[in-house]
Image (cartoon, rainbow, N blue to C red):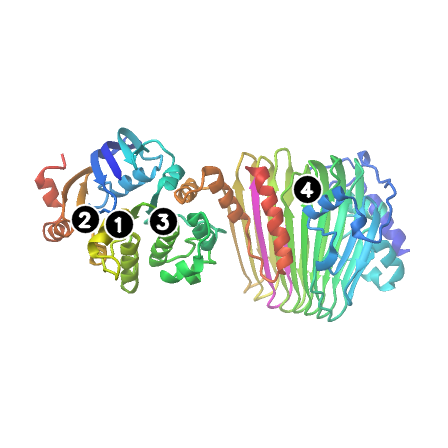
Amino acid sequence: MRIRDLDEKARSARQKAAAYGPDIDLDSYTVESPSHEVIDDLDRLSDSDKERMLLAGIESDTGERSGSYIQKDGVPVYTASLQEGLEVIPIREALEKFDWLADYYWKLIDVDTDKYTARARLDLHNGYLIRALPGARITFPAQACMYLEKDGFSQNVHNIIIAEEGSELHVITGCATAAHVSGGIHVGISEFYVKKNAKLSFTMIHHWAEDVLVRPRSAGIVEEGGLFLNNYICMKPVKSLQTYPRTSLVGRGAVARFYSLLVGSPGGELDVGGGIDLKAEETRAEIISRAISNGGNILARGDLVGEVPGARGHLECRGLILNHGMIHAIPELVGKVDGVEMSHEAAVGKIAQEEIFYLMSRGLTEEEATATIVRGFLSVDIPDLPAPLQKEIDRAVDLSREDML
Amino acid sequence: MLVIEDLQVMMGDKELLKHIDLEIRPGETHILFGPNGSGKTSLIMTIMGYPQYRVTAGKIYFKGEDITSLPIDERARLGIGMSYQRPPSIKGLKTRHLVDICAGDGVDTDALAERINMNNFLDRDINVGFSGGEIKRSELLQLMAQKPDLLLFDEPESGVDLENIALIGTTINELLERDHTPTRDKTVKEIKKARSRMGLVITHTGFILDYVTADRGEVLYDGVLACKSNPIEIFKQIKTVGYEECVRCGFAT
């Protein structure tokens, strides 16, 4: 009955345009997935697949990973959890296996939000449940990869990530396309649950192709004493990306921090936001974005809503226009009661010439100086992030530098 | 050797430097005096190669090469280095990384930083939130790594507290190879003879003269360079009669 209701709701939103981002004709992308062989060892991926996945932070050598989920087009081809206390399961299987999962599925996001949520509901391929059991300290990151191999495919996934009470979980998710793919769409629902005193870091590295459209729909909830760290890195060309993850801090002392590093390439449209609702005492929120336009258009949105006294938040949007293009920073703060403390800083500009000259006087060429400044602009210290994940972020940033200059 | 011949420099339509002649031989350090706005910074920025300082006439030679129209980085690679009065801050660029850039190849950055009391700043973004004295020490640290043959100092003592002025002064003295203390195998004469570093130091307060020995002094007034003489003597004169005397001497015409 409930299921039928949800489906009905989704159907009513099939043509509903999203609040932000260019509208997409979903009918021109097929939901018929080709079949893919399920593998029992990541080493059996082709070298070319491995290489593409590595660019998005996915290691085929899983020595430093606690678990893996690899989905090609619509098919989960590899699933593994290598550490006790960690569950990595394809979402369809998990929904059948766990009755309780119904309390987490479509609970933070409405199915009729727009045509993309509707598609993820009605034409779901798969996705994953990644869960750290209560008290489990999953020290190595779990990795998940959404891979597009079929041209013109609409990949529709739903992910649920749960850090149970007192647990620690780090997830790196890489999205990438096979080398030959030029176009396709990725629709991804992600629901994050950070329980009491749990710690979750979620680092997403996107490595799409030039004609790929991306519509993630994410939401999270953080309970008392929980920490949610959400990093989003998109340095490679993509045709259109629109996302606006929203997180609620509902328990005392809950903390959420969003970091995004974006590069907009010629012809690309990036509309990336982040919203955090501070609903409990002593909650803290931080949204930090660095955007570089290398000829593309970037909208960097941020929204903090303080609903209780003593809630504190800070928003920082910095944009650098390198080679034309546009950056539109839209930081928003809403304080609903006395005693909230929220601030923002936004700046859009170009590289200051005196900085280039300064480095040239230390022996760097103009190009080297520019690259060094850009690298600095993109280097954000993310507290609480394990070193291997910081390394992946640094690698993604370093790779992008060559494209920009 | 640095040779400047009849140099004229403009910024926009303003004439900044007029018919400057200057020669700094290997091993020599010069002190450049002058009131605010007289063109001291313009002169060293022009030597460094900042393009907004437009050379309209004259030549600059360094190590026998005409560098008048060389870009900044090529001058740096030829061996010219500068300690800035107000360098820009660059977010995300760690001081450590910049020191490595200056060194070009392997350098023990921590050991170098220790000498100028900058260890705690190596992992901070360059110049971001640095105090006046910290900026000056950071500049010196970069020059210690860069090891240029010609060092240009733009008011290295400005904004520095008394506690650090001695450290900065003695470090500059070392950078310029001004220390004459004889060793077991070298006499003072030999040490002086082996000295090859060249220096041009802008000072406003003259404090630096307590630490740095110099061979010559020059006064720049309204874009004209004159009064080439003993630096201590010039400084004494300025202290007693001020720059007004420069006007009376008639070189500022």
Chain of the residue displaying label 4: A
Q: Check the image and report above or below for A249 versus B7.
A: below
Chain of the residue displaying label 2: B
On the same chain: label 2 and label 1?
yes
Q: Residue furthest right?
A: A1
Q: Position of residue B8 (x, y in %)?
A: 24, 31
Gap between marks 1 and 4, in whole Å? 64 Å
Q: Is residue B111 left or right of residue A229?
A: left
Question: What residue is shown with label 1?
Answer: B194
Q: Check the image and report above or below for A351 versus A313.
A: above
Question: What residue is shown with label 2?
Answer: B215
Looking at the rendered structure, the secondary structure element under dot 1 is helix
Q: Is residue B234 left or right of residue A70?
A: left
Q: Check the image and report above or below for A251 versus B234.
A: below
Looking at the rendered structure, the secondary structure element under dot 2 is loop
On the same chain: label 1 and label 4?
no
Q: Is residue A372 left or right of residue A242?
A: left
The quadrant of the image that shows the N terminus of chain A is: bottom right
Chain of the residue displaying label 3: B
Q: Nearer the viewer, mark 1 or mark 3?
A: 1
Q: Are marks 2 and 4 in contact (CB under 8 Å)?
A: no
User: What residue is at 76 percent from the left and 37 percent from the top?
Assistant: A184
Q: Is residue A275 magenta?
A: yes
Q: Nearer the viewer, mark 2 or mark 1?
A: 1
Q: Between disc 3 and disc 2, whose residue precedes?
A: 3
Gap between marks 2 and 4, in whole Å? 65 Å
Q: Between disc 2 and disc 1, whose residue precedes?
A: 1
User: What residue is at 68 percent from the left and 46 percent from the top?
Assistant: A55
Q: Between disc 1 and disc 3, whose residue precedes?
A: 3
Q: Which residues are magenta?
A: A274-293
Gap between marks 1 and 3, in whole Å? 16 Å
Q: Is residue A355 magenta?
A: no
